[in-house]
Amino acid sequence: MARMLALLLRADTDAAVAVYLTLRRSTARKEAIYAAAIHLEAEATAILKALMVVVDAAEGERNSLAHGQYFCTDVLPESILWINMTDGVTIQTRLLRELKSLDFTTTPEQRKDFMAKVYHYTIKSLYSIRDQIFEAEHAIYLFNQYLMCIQGFKLSETREQIYDRIRRLAPMARAIRHLLELADRKAQKSPVWQYQQSYEFGSQSGRLRLEANEWVEIRKPSL
């Protein structure tokens, strides 16, 4: 992404990378890229928007893995249970209060609320997240090649060939279709427009929500 900013700015790569790395929040980095891309033609801008959808999806998965809390159970030996960091801290705080008061009772509402916040990862879903991150990296690489062609670099493939390769990448094709559907809904002023902002293959796709029967087994006390 730092190299992308350098290409968009047509600037010295080292200086552009240094600027990019000073931006700590991903939102600020994306805003910098969009600002630098203001001179792009409509075709390139459309590809960039789709690319950002793909990057956001992979980044969301990475952030969940990095900032969630994990635990395990013998009932699901092939899975790792996951909960959002904020929810995990809230629950731990409540448990500490219960320890102090020796009141370990939980209401059905509390159990239901906790269940709704717990997901589990499997080996298969973790491999899926890995592949999603690799695909995003490959899409970024191809887009950088595309920008180089626009700027007159002599590469082994033409601009049109690279453009076709980008569009045929599975996550890019899904993102482009998603953005077109959103644009169509907006043009029609559909009442569901404001509720259709999530990407169909977006963040949290790797996590699996616990089924009710699995939750019952997890909550069953040891004999």
Image (cartoon, grey):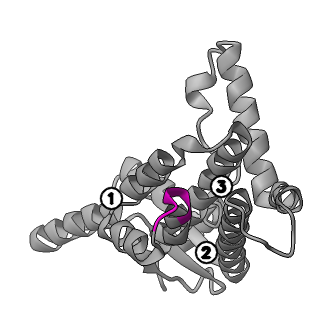
Q: Is residue 116 left or right of residue 96?
A: right
Name which residue type carries label 1: Thr
**Residue at coordinates 53% horizontally, 71% vertically from top-left?**
3
Residue 103 in sight here: no
**Residue at coordinates 40% horizontally, 63% vertically from top-left?**
84
Query: Where does the magenta region start and end?
Result: 7-11
Q: Nearer the viewer, mark 1 or mark 2?
A: 2
Q: Find residue 107 and report its horizontal and vertical position in percent.
A: 35, 52
Q: Nearer the viewer, mark 3 or mark 1?
A: 3
User: Marks 2 and 3: in contact by CB < 8 Å?
Assistant: no
9 in the magenta segment: yes
* Above or below 72: residue 21: above
Name which residue type carries label 2: Tyr
Q: Which residue is mark 1?
A: 106
Q: Find residue 137 and report its horizontal and vertical position in percent.
A: 65, 72
Q: Which residue is mark 2?
A: 121
**Along the viewing direction, whichever of 82 and 176 lies nearer the viewer:** 176
Q: Nearer the viewer, mark 3 or mark 2?
A: 3
Q: CA distance from mark 1 to mark 2?
A: 26 Å
Circle 2 residues within 10 Å: few <14, some 14–19, many ≥20: some
**Residue at coordinates 72% horizontally, 76% vertically from top-left?**
131
SS under mark 1? loop
Circle 3 residues within 10 Å: few <14, some 14–19, many ≥20: many
